[in-house]
Amino acid sequence: MGIVLKDGTGAGNEAKVDTSNRLHTQALTEAAMHEKSSIDGDVYFVSTNGFIDINTLNTETAILYTKNTSTTDQFVINSIRTCGNQVQKILMYRNPSTGTIIDNATAGQNTNANFSSSNTPSLTTYKGADTYTFTDGTHLANHVNHVGHSTEKTGDAIILGPNDSLGITFELAASGYVCAALEGYFETVAT
């Protein structure tokens, strides 16, 4: 006879194994974002804090820059939200470090998603304005967003390690307004 698994509550319930030799179980799973927000209070919305008017056409305009200033934790980006009232070409840059968006240093918004948490993120975030630029960084990705908004789920794959940064630019063919936001959480860098 094999091992019998009992429920451990004293009720005497035993685990079921079916004819295909599968153990029947139930599990409760939580998304990383939920766990990091409810338990750690460490999920953040990083944004332009409103809309940015763009009137310089067919030219990239830097609208959001964020840098992880933590020396021990990485910022895991779960999703990227973009919006606008015109069709937008959106480009993302890995590790930009220069440009007028950084020189002008207009604070963007870093907001904790857990209203009960007093944690603050180790992020430096700037929002851009019409004609703002990045002058370096490596192209990471791009997409086209139609009028309205878009949420690109990253599957937690975009990770800003200590001192890494992410930049987002928009290019419009007609004057309009745009916005951008990141949703993510901090976790300790695995060693």
Image (cartoon, grey):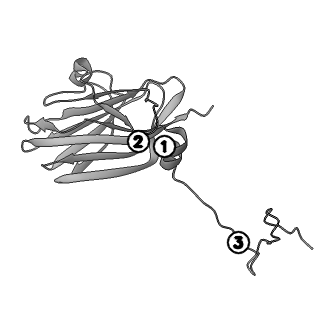
Left or right of 156, for residue 4:
right
Mark nearest the camera among 3 and 1 is 1
Instruction: Kindly state the secondary structure of the residue where label 1 is placed.
Output: helix
Residue type (three-letter) at the residue carrying disc 1: Ser
Q: Of marks 3 and 1, which one's residue comes earlier in the chain?
A: 3
The residue identified by callout 3 is 24
Query: In the picture provided, is 98 more to the left or to the right than 117?
Result: left
The mark tally for this picture is: 3
Q: Quadrant of the N terminus?
A: bottom right
Residue linked to disc 1:
37
Residue nearer the viewer, 110 or 137: 110
Kindly indicate whether the residue at mark 2 contacts the one at mark 1 (C-beta within 8 angstroms): yes
Quarter of the view holding residue 136: top left
Task: Tell me the kind of residue under disc 2.
Answer: Ala
Q: Which amino acid does label 3 sit on?
A: His
The residue under the point 53% across, 39% down is 40
Residue 184 x, y percent position in the rendering: 42, 41
Residue assigned mark 2:
113
Question: Marks 2 and 3, Cα distance to the nearest angstrom?
Answer: 36 Å
In-front residue for pair 13/96: 13
Q: Where is residue 150 in the image (x, y as percent from the top left)?
A: 27, 52
